[in-house]
Amino acid sequence: MPGIAIELTAVVVAVTAEEPRILTLRSGKALPSGSFESGHRTLQMGLRAWVEKQTHHPLGYVEQLYTFADRDRVHDGGRIVSISYLGLTREAEAPAGGTAPGWRGWYRYFPWEDWRDGPPKLVARLILPGLRDWARRAPDAVARKARGQRIDLTFGAAPWNEELVLQRYELLFEAALVPEARRRRSTGGEAIPGEAMVHDHRRILATGIARLRAKIKYRPVVFELMPPAFTLLQLQRTVEALAGQQLHKQNFRRLIDTQGLVEETGQISTETGGRPAKLYRFRREVVAERAVAGSKLPIARPI
């Protein structure tokens, strides 16, 4: 009788050139994953060991993300339980080759999540019409209303809720608008843009993005993605890249100043393309001294 296998899966994030990127395998089709080995004292130690072995890339900050144990997670006749982790680091050059580890922008998998330049055109052009058609095909009035409410909450709500990444992906999956759902159900037709991944790895990635978008509002984890010295504009652009939305510049800087999270290095950057800018560093002792108060991101809303 087939048993249950336990695997570890990692969502490893870096921000490079103002773009959030993830470490992938199999030409961008898979997240780093592998079987749990009982020789490691803890799951996290095991994850760090095999991620480094698979990708030749050490992990920095790591936290457990979620356990995926759905009944349809079956491979070779056995059920697979995946324990996923979120890791934050700075991008390092990966070995060349199509099957080698590589960094990919996460918006290539979720193009509807990037609102930094306003609403993506594909939301109004493809996603909402596809979802509305799916809602109309519900078996009864109660189901049609429920589907409509979910659509309004995830894609039709104003202002945009950047944390509902997983809910949006699962809605698109249920409506068979993503390749993974069409692959499983043998459904024909063209899926909406967004690169597919193997198994349920895009769902795991959506969970990681949602967690990180929520986390940056109440813990200073964004500094795990920053170089030792940075400008305030670089910090703002990194947060915007993760959130997928523009921030109000003055309010963002006021928030950083109020929290006392950074201090000047005494050095100046001349690589800003404009006037020289002061360089700052993260004050790690702040986290040890006190809990940093949570705050909503100062999203720049359209007038």
Image (cartoon, rainbow, N blue to C red):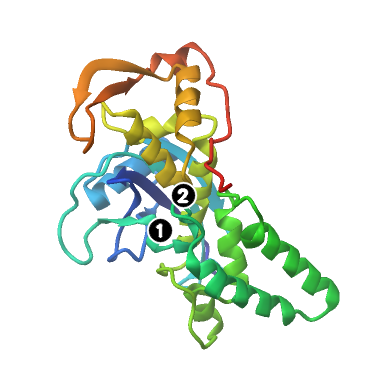
Residue 95 sits above or below residue 233 on the image? below
Amino acid type at image mark 1? Tyr
**Total count of labels:** 2
Where in the figure is residue 130, as x and y percent of width and height? 60, 77
Residue 107 numbered mark, or none: 1
Per the image, the residue denoted by label 2 is 244
Q: Earlier in the sequence, mark 1 or mark 2?
A: 1
Secondary structure type for disc 1: helix
Residue lying furthest left in this view? 96
In which quadrant of the rendered image does the N terminus lie? bottom right
Where in the figure is residue 244, as x and y percent of width and height? 46, 49
In the image, taking residue 282 as reference, residue 303 lies left or right, namely right
For image coordinates 42% across by 52% down, the residue present is: 9
**Looking at the image, can residue 279 be seen?**
yes
Q: How dense is the environment of label 2, judged by Cα within 10 Å: few (below 14), some, or many (20 and up)?
A: many
Secondary structure type for disc 2: loop
Residue 46 sits in quarter:
top left
Between the C-alphas of marks 1 and 2, the distance is: 9 Å
Residue 274 sits in quarter:
top left
**Looking at the image, can residue 36 be seen?**
no
Where in the figure is residue 198, as x and y percent of width and height? 41, 68
In this view, the mark in front (1 or 2)? 2
Where in the figure is residue 276, as x and y percent of width and height? 22, 27
Residue 30 sits above or below residue 268 on the image? below
